[in-house]
Amino acid sequence: MSGARLRTAAIVTLVVAALLGSAYTLGRSLIPDPPPRNTGVSASVTGPHYADQPPSTDFPAPARPTPDASPSGPETDQQAPAEDEGPYGSRISTGSSQIALTFDDGPDPRYTPQVLALLKEYHVKATFCVVGENAEAHPELIQAIVADGHTLCNHSWNHDENLGKRSPDTIQADLSRTSDAIRAAVPTARIEYFRQPGGNWTKPIVSICTELGMVPLHWAVDPSDWTAPGAKAIISTVLAQTGPGSIVLLHDAGGDRSGTVDALRDLLPALLDRFQLEALPAGTT
């Protein structure tokens, strides 16, 4: 075959290839992309975890302020986070540069005394959110909490996570019964905070606890110690997320709290190196 014919054949081949490529591209553009494959994994694997059960879609998620990642010493001059309100105006900040440890679901005869002993060792005051039926069963532990200078918070009668959906009369009776059980142990007890189990706040329960003279108390830092993740995980989360003004959620009852007790042995000195710790004050209402 002559050189001219070879060149002509090569040109024809290139033209045909180009036309076929264009046709393929055009055809692909007319076919819609397939829908994403469902992997069975939630799109939000880092969503908030409430203190006492997985998140509910019926209730708002807690607000979480962003702490200072690397404080260099005791936080006495920094201002508390501006975002000091949680769901329905509940409290998530101490209102100062100090931080507050809170302990839910007690009192418990096994773990509450251990928590009290560690707090006394490090001269730290905290706030205990107690369940009414536990207060009634262990009045001596309510007395010990108050005697050590800690403050008290109403945490409902029997940890009803759906209390906020009950009738106003039911809500009021539950909160009043819990406060009565606390005062049966310590008649002079100041109960100026209420924490809704699971953080499942609703407008009615905030309104009623306020009418009863209690501040709705939420939190800013939740290491999910109720899931018993182990002391190291609890320590890591608290130290990473705590900033000036943080209210830290922990548990001294409601299950195996040995991990929380173990975590406190390292957490208390570590936090004291960075912050001043306080009990949420009585006499705020």
Image (tube, rainbow, N blue to C red):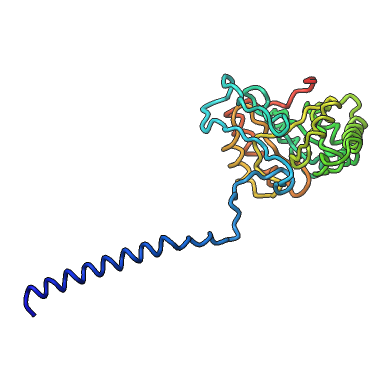
Q: Is residue 64 left or right of residue 284?
A: left
Please report the residue visible at 71 percent of the width from the left and 33 percent of the height from the top.
119
In the figure, is residue 260 to the left or right of 132? left
- Is any atom of residue 258 visible in this view? no
- How many numbered discs sit on the rendered protein? 0
Instruction: Reply above or below: 111 against 151.
Output: below
At x 79%, y 41%, the residue is 105
Percent coordinates x, y for residue 232 in the rendering: 60, 46
Query: Could you tell me residue 110's position as x and y percent?
Result: 80, 45
Q: Nearer the viewer, residue 18 or 88?
A: 18
For the question of whether residue 279 can be seen, the reply is yes
Q: In the picture, which quadrant includes the C terminus? A: top right
Q: Which residue is rendered at x = 62% and y = 35% of the image?
A: 64
Name the image quarter holding the N terminus.
Answer: bottom left
Considering depth in this image, is 208 or 29 the residue closer to the camera?
29
Res. 13 image quadrant: bottom left
Where 115 sits versus 21, above or below?
A: above
138 to the left or right of 39: right
Residue 47 x/y as whole percent: 62, 45
The part of the image, by quadrant, that contains residue 191 is: top right
Q: Position of residue 277 (x, y in %)?
A: 66, 27
| Quadrant in which residue 21 is drawn | bottom left
